[in-house]
Image (cartoon, rainbow, N blue to C red):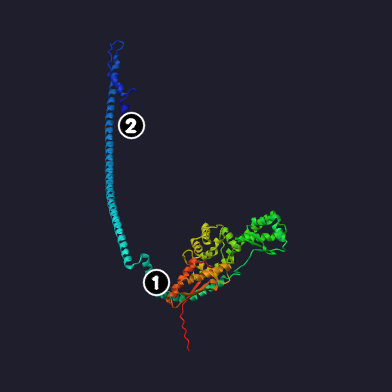
Amino acid sequence: MSLFGNLSSLFTTDGQSPAKKTRLKQKPRPKKVARPQDRPHPQAQPQLQKRDLSQTSDVREAQAKAREIVVEAKDEALAIKAKAENEARQSRQEIEEQQRQLNKQFDKIEVRLSNLDTKEENLEKSKQNAEKIKTEVEKQRAQIIEKLEKIASLTKDEARDELFESLEKKMSQEMAQFIRQKQEEAKTEADDRIREILVDSMKHGATDYVPEYTVSTVIIPSEDVKGKIIGKSGRNIHTFERFTGVDVDLDSAATEVRLSSFDSVRREVARVSLERLIKDGRIQPSRIEEVVTKVRQEIEKIMFEAGKKLCHDVSIYNLPPELMQMLGKFKYRFSYGQNLIAHTLEETKIGIKIAHELGADVNVVKLGCLLHDIGKVSEEVEGSHVELGVKIAKKYNLPQPVIDCIAQHHEDEPFSGVEQMIVYIADAISGARPGARYENHEEYVKRLEKLEEIAVSYPGVAEAYAIQAGREIRVLLNPEKTKDDDVEVLAIKIKDRVKEEMTYPGTVTVNVSREKRTKQVAT
């Protein structure tokens, strides 16, 4: 722009453009007749000639400069053109290189697609061949089975049962020998150590009291108090039962009131409330509601303190308060007459001791023992206490090994580690030892009868006796109908059936005996 601007300024004079000057030059001018007054003075002619010469030299210089500028403009234009052609050439080369790369990639993709198509076709053919072979094999298998059934005159199931029966007879001697060998090895290596660990653990786990047999009864000073408890038209007793959720039995004894409910906490609230109402003497609906509400609040505090004390007794201080509150319910909860706080404390101490002896994770065992029965005080109804306990543990984000301890302490799942097995052992020691628990007499008798029924259901059993309060079943075999090898096998079968079909506290020992007696009389 500066170059062409200079050119235009050079060719412009007296404020007029070159184009306009050209037009002015081309326009014919009329000739004037010179008048005498218009003719220049003879002395002015040299000055005019000098002016014309200076103007001519200026024009020449301007034209020279214009030519120089034009030459420079052409050179610059040529340089710009060369540069543009060079850039265009490079761009074309880059585009061509990219096009070549793309063509190569397209070629590779086409090759891969063709290979994939080929593989897919081969796989389809292989699949069809496999299906044909499978169909032929199944057909031949069915024909072979049919021929075998015709030859043996037995169905498939009958032949399988007969085969298993013959194998069991052949292998019974080896099975019994193998079982005896393993038992002897285990006894030789483990008896002394196990006895030492368990005795030492039970010694350290002993608590001040273990079984606690209680009945929710309230002693009244006289039989007249029963009238106050009943109230006019029974309004007092109905109000009491409605607010406490328990049944009141006034006919058990003259000076005794019996309270019954499946919930031990409700029963305890009712017992304390009734004792306070009798002591106060003002037994009326409004007073009953007031006392029951106050006692319930006190019982909740007592339960929290009991749960907190239980945790502190086993050196656990960072448990959530909600779990401590639930553990406090153990104070009024019993299992076969055994108080749950006492059972939990004893079991936890035993488990901690065993964990120390075996080098297991003491913290996992401690929490597992402490919370193994937490499902028994859950507010949910559906599910066993093991399932409910697992839900509670997951709700409070407890570690997975602790959840496994809760889930496996009744062998509902296979043991996942030594800590889970220790919790199971500690629970069995605390709950199964003599004097720890009691159960209903009818259920106790039924359990003993069921044990004997399972034992005598096997052929070759002469007699069976349930002894040791159902903790042992002694089985006597008929020597004429059995062999020595049957002793070990039958013991395992009875044990498996007892585990699958019965519910029992602790363990049941199966003792199978076979002896041959000969009697001769000398005369």
* Quadrant of the snapshot with the N terminus: top left
* Residue 240 vertical position relative to residue 68 in the rendered view, above or below: below
Residue situated furthest bottom in the rendering: 523
Residue shown at 52% from the left, 62% from the top: 386
* Numbered-mark total: 2
Image quarter for residue 212? Answer: bottom right
> Mark 2 packing: few (<14 Cα in 10 Å), some, or many (20+)?
few
Q: Position of residue 272 (x, y in %)?
A: 66, 61
* Residue 49 vertical position relative to residue 453 in the rendered view, above or below: above
* Residue 168: numbered disc: 1
- Is residue 124 left or right of 272 when viewed as pictured? left
Q: Position of residue 296 (x, y in %)?
A: 64, 57
What residue is disc 2 on? 2
- The local secondary structure at tag 2 comes to helix
Q: Position of residue 215 (x, y in %)?
A: 63, 65
Q: Let me know if residue 287 appears in the view.
A: no
For marks 2 and 1, give the one nearer the viewer.
Answer: 1
> Mark 1 packing: few (<14 Cα in 10 Å), some, or many (20+)?
some
Marked residue nearer the N-terminal end (2 or 1): 2
* Residue 68 vertical position relative to residue 162 in the rendered view, above or below: above
Residue situated furthest top in the rendering: 36
Q: What's the distance in space between the residues labelled 2 and 1, CA to CA?
A: 115 Å
- Is residue 523 left or right of 301 when viewed as pictured? left
Of residues 269 and 191, which is closer to you in this image? 269
- The local secondary structure at tag 1 comes to helix
Residue situated furthest front in the rendering: 523
Q: Determine whether label 2 and label 1 are within 8 Å by CB.
A: no
Q: Position of residue 217 (x, y in %)?
A: 66, 64
* Residue 476: numbered disc: none
Going by the numbered disc 1, the residue's amino acid type is Glu
- Is residue 90 left or right of 457 when viewed as pictured? left
Going by the numbered disc 2, the residue's amino acid type is Ser
